[in-house]
Image (cartoon, grey):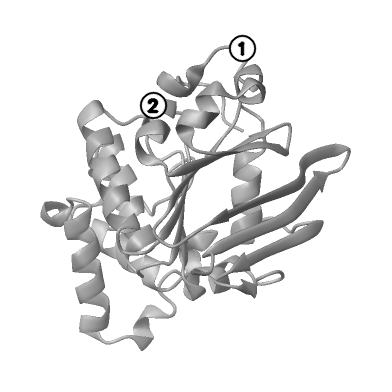
Amino acid sequence: MNAALEVVSLSKRFGGLQALAEVSLHAMPGEILGLIGPNGAGKSTLVACITGVQRIDSGAVRFQGADIHGLPPHSRARKGIGRTFQKVRLADSLTVYENVAAGLSGSWFVNGRGWFRTLGQLSGRAIHDPVARALEATGLGDFTHAVVKSLPFGRRHFVELARAIVAEPRLLLLDEPATGLTDPERERLARLVRDIAARDCAIVLVEHDLQLVSRLCDRVTVINHGRCIFTGTPAAAEKDSDVVTAYLGVNQLTARGGDEARD
C-alpha cells in the first residue's frame, strides 16, 4: 500500500531562522500519525508546508504518490487534503450549514474570500447530501441553521471539523483540535477521529494533549528545533531519551498538555 502522505527531507527557513531542517515522515491510509514536540518545534510550520500555505525551501511533499510542490492550497484541498487550524477559522455570520458547505469548494483553505464561487456549479443534492453526512458525523444535525457566532467554543471546533471532512478527504491534518474542549467533547473528538481513519483516511494529529495522542495514534513523529528526533509508537516515545529531554526532562506523554503558547 502506498503512503497517503510523504514528506521527504523538507527544509524551511524564515530569514535567519531555520524553522525546519531535513524533516521526513509518512502517513499511511487509515493511520493516525501524531506530530508532537515542544512549543516552537515547528509543527504548525510543517502543516503549513504540507498544505501549501508556506513554500518549502528544499525537499518534497507527496500526496498519494504525486509531488504536489507548487500547487496552491485550494488545489491541494480539491485533490483530497483536508485540514483544521490552531485557531478556529469560520465565517461567524453564516450558518453551520453554509460553513460546512464551503468545504466542498476548497477555496476556504486559506481564507473566506470566494468560498461559494464553485458551489454554484454543483446541484442541490451534490451539496446537501455530503453536508448532511458531515453534520451527522460531528453531532451537529440539530444546529444546521444556527448562526456560527451563536455557538459555544467547543461546538465551533466541530463545525470546522465538519467542514474539513465534508469532501471526504484522503488526508486530514488536525492542528490542535482538542484545545479548549471539555472532557466529553474530547471523547467525541476521539471517536470521530477513529471513525474517519477507519474509512482509510490518513490523519496527522498535531496536539498538545499528549494523553490523547497516546490513546489515539498508531505512531508518533517528534520534532524539536525543526528536526525530526523520533518516529515510532507512543509507548516507545515515552522511553526515548531524546524525546524526554526535548520535553525538559519531564515525561509528558502520559499527562495532559496545558495551555502553552502555540508554535
Percent position of residue 131, x then y: 24, 68
Q: Amino acid at mark 2?
A: Gln
Does residue 93 appear in this view? no
Q: Residue furthest left?
A: 142
The answer to which image quadrant residue 136 occupies is bottom left
Mark seen at residue 52: none
Percent position of residue 206, x then y: 50, 40
Percent position of residue 208, x then y: 48, 29
From this view, report whether residue 46 is shown above or below residue 7. above
Q: Amino acid at mark 1?
A: Gly
Residue underneath mark 2: 211
Label 2 element class: helix
Between 35 and 156, the one lying in front of the other is 35
Q: CA distance from mark 2 to mark 1?
A: 17 Å
The answer to which image quadrant residue 88 occupies is top left
Pointer 2 local density, CA inside 10 Å: few below 14, some 14–19, many at least 20:
some
From this view, report whether residue 34 is shown above or below residue 53. above
Mark seen at residue 249: 1
Residue at the (24%, 62%) spot, across then down? 134
